[in-house]
Image (cartoon, coloured by chain):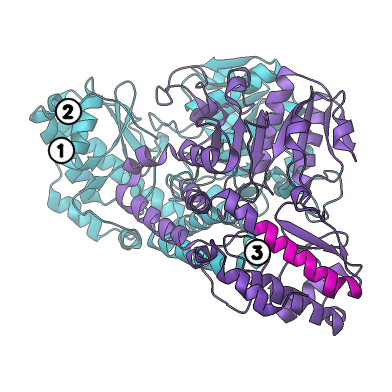
Chain colours: A cyan, B purple
Amino acid sequence: MISREDVAALDAADPLAAFRERFVFTDEHRIYLDGNSLGRLPIATRDRLRDLADEWGDRLVSGWPAWIDAPTRVGNLLAEHVLGARPGEVVVGDSTTVNLYKLCSAALDVAPGPLVTNRDNFPTDRYVLEGLAAQRGVELRLVDDIERGLAGAAVAVISHVDYRTGEIADMRALSAGRARVIWDLSHSAGAIPIALRDAGVELAVGCTYKYLNGGPGAPAFLYVAEELQPRLRSPIWGWFGQRDQFAMERSYDPVDGIGRFLAGTPGVLDLAAVEEGVRLTAEAGVDRLREKSLALCELIIDVHDAWLAPLGFELGSPRDGERRGSHVSLRHPEAWPICRALIERAAVIPDFRGPDSIRLGVAPLYTRFVDVYDALDRLRGVVERGEQKLVSAEKTRIT
Amino acid sequence: MISREDVAALDAADPLAAFRERFVFTDEHRIYLDGNSLGRLPIATRDRLRDLADEWGDRLVSGWPAWIDAPTRVGNLLAEHVLGARPGEVVVGDSTTVNLYKLCSAALDVAPGPLVTNRDNFPTDRYVLEGLAAQRGVELRLVDDIERGLAGAAVAVISHVDYRTGEIADMRALSAGRARVIWDLSHSAGAIPIALRDAGVELAVGCTYKYLNGGPGAPAFLYVAEELQPRLRSPIWGWFGQRDQFAMERSYDPVDGIGRFLAGTPGVLDLAAVEEGVRLTAEAGVDRLREKSLALCELIIDVHDAWLAPLGFELGSPRDGERRGSHVSLRHPEAWPICRALIERAAVIPDFRGPDSIRLGVAPLYTRFVDVYDALDRLRGVVERGEQKLVSAEKTRIT
């Protein structure tokens, strides 16, 4: 079993170690393993928000020329550094839910037919599809095996990384069939290398407030492969998608390119926060982040095998790093009270996912090897002392 | 003709004068008459954004219990103080465009039929309707006279205050017919008293970044009368509209009440900014704001008649205050270059609206009587000296 000294040595040798200083830490004792739900506040973001408020206060409406391109500017940053897409293929704005609705509706317009997704896909993805199935009178197939489920489907929605198990779906293989796949990159963007163009992906959406550290409820991104853009239309025709936007008299005539998927006026404050978050990820580089994430997750698994498996835990994520995103789920019949006890009594912040999983997310920009080691040491202590019997059973959580 | 001393006396007697100190001013020489496009930065908002960033940095995911109710909390504040609605009838989130799409789609679900709006309604409102008409195969009627246009229509979208002329539509009368009217309150919310319930309004949306000072691209509000809520469904089924949101396994089952019109995760930073803006309006009281706004606009009209009409200006807004919102449009054949010259050479910030209108918006929370007087004095000087001949003709503007 690896010692804490060995683990500290991993941090000392970590080429990304200095990025931790770029984030706000208010409590050095607390160990945060939920960056896969809400990423930390970058110092640059705190400063940028202050500057942006000042800009609003000073420049007022004349600030707009500098703000108006934020959805495409931040989109291009994501395209280049995070998504493996071309400039002009990504915009940031609206929520993941709204963006998924737009793309799914647009895809059904050009190829009506059955919808398919995993039975246990993230709820909002399923709900969007349920709604569209009802509205369009098409079938929604909820399947256990998405690869088989794609047969005969017109449009599929697949999460690149499963929000519970952390399992990575085979983007290239699943994109190669006849069903048009919309990828939800919420749990992979910024955590694992993504090469949308190279993998033949046509459509994708994803969240910026997890590994990209965009802030609570930050706007989402939307990707449409260049070739497909002229053929697709957002169902929501809005003035930010309009050609010659300020010639107010005309009928709707969407711009060429990805801008046609914008709708209303974009939230400038939120976009600035996303931009700073993405910049940090770009600076570190997703390949290096992935390398560290793999090592951190392997440490979780090794320590789990040594300390936690004897206490009734089971690994709920793939053991093979190639098939696993940036979080590890540990299953235990008492997962919920253990999770509460960890938070309340041991200052470790994981995430619970029903029915029986504790998600431990590592965010390689700021998670250290000693954080993982100490968190699992505290987890072991909590369970050995039976502290999960001492906490309240109330369940309220957010992803 | 009123003198500057008389005008200064109006400020001295203004019961709302102190509210100006609650906003950030960086340039006392510049006169901002475009709060109807983008409101000023309240000092409380600047502070709140800093606090909220700190809250994110410190509380991380455990901040959500305090944040998650923001859409309904800010909605209730608007309902009570700005919209004349009941608690539980308003939410804040998404853009005006997306919210209009939701309500219009929901209204068509229960009563399919022709759509109608003013031919010169704000572009994004028209675009949303164009899109829905195309998708649903219903007719869209663009009319000059909305009162007559309502006959035979299933769903209408009407701006409460016309974004160009400032004219107020008769909410009660137009809501009384058989067509279901969705009101766009973007140019009236916070500027004139609104009594949605009293006027029999069923559906409304509106913007928070104008008179409500929510910040650039701040999220919009959405109102659905309580009685109608059980019968309507948003087309975008998302997890923030789901009953028992964190029981992740279930099919979509929208909450009772206004929450069913939420979709994805709300932007917490933007919502905090809206909340502070609305609080200021609530504190001042819309009735008092309206009283001051009427007086400010009357001053514009009086001075226009004395100084500007002789220079070729014409009033582009109703002369009768009862029929006018909180901006006055002045028409002039050279409106565009005059507008540029005013901004570039006289530090007065109005707004241009094609083809020939200069919009002068008064925001009674921070616009003084001397601001109006001085701005028009500078406008007179610009035109008398022919400075509109000296500016570039490039047109790029934003509302």
User: Which residue is the site of mark 1?
Assistant: A345
Left or right: B6 in relation to A174? right
Q: Quadrant of the C terminus of chain A?
A: top left
* Amino acid at the residue labelled 1: Arg
User: Quick check: B257 above or below A33?
Assistant: above
Q: On what subunit does the disc labeled 1 rest?
A: A
Look at the image and give the residue range highlighted in magenta: B293-310
Label 1 vs label 2: CA separation? 9 Å
- Extreme left residue here? A385
Left or right: A351 in relation to A106? left
Name the one closer to the observer, B292 or A263.
B292
Q: Residue at x 80, y 40 (%)?
A: B126
Pointer 3 or 1: first along the chain: 3
Q: Residue at x 24, y 56 (%)?
A: A11
User: Which residue is the site of mark 2?
Assistant: A391
The secondary element bearing badge 3 is classed as helix
Q: Residue at x 20, y 26 (%)?
A: A392
Packing grade of label 1 (10 A; few <14, some 14-19, many >=20) is some
Residue A166: x %, y % from top left: 39, 33
Is circle 3 on the same chain as circle 2? yes
Mark 1–mark 2 CB contact (< 8 Å)? yes
Residue B107: x %, y % from top left: 71, 24
Mark 3–mark 2 CB contact (< 8 Å)? no
Label 3 vs label 1: CA separation? 49 Å
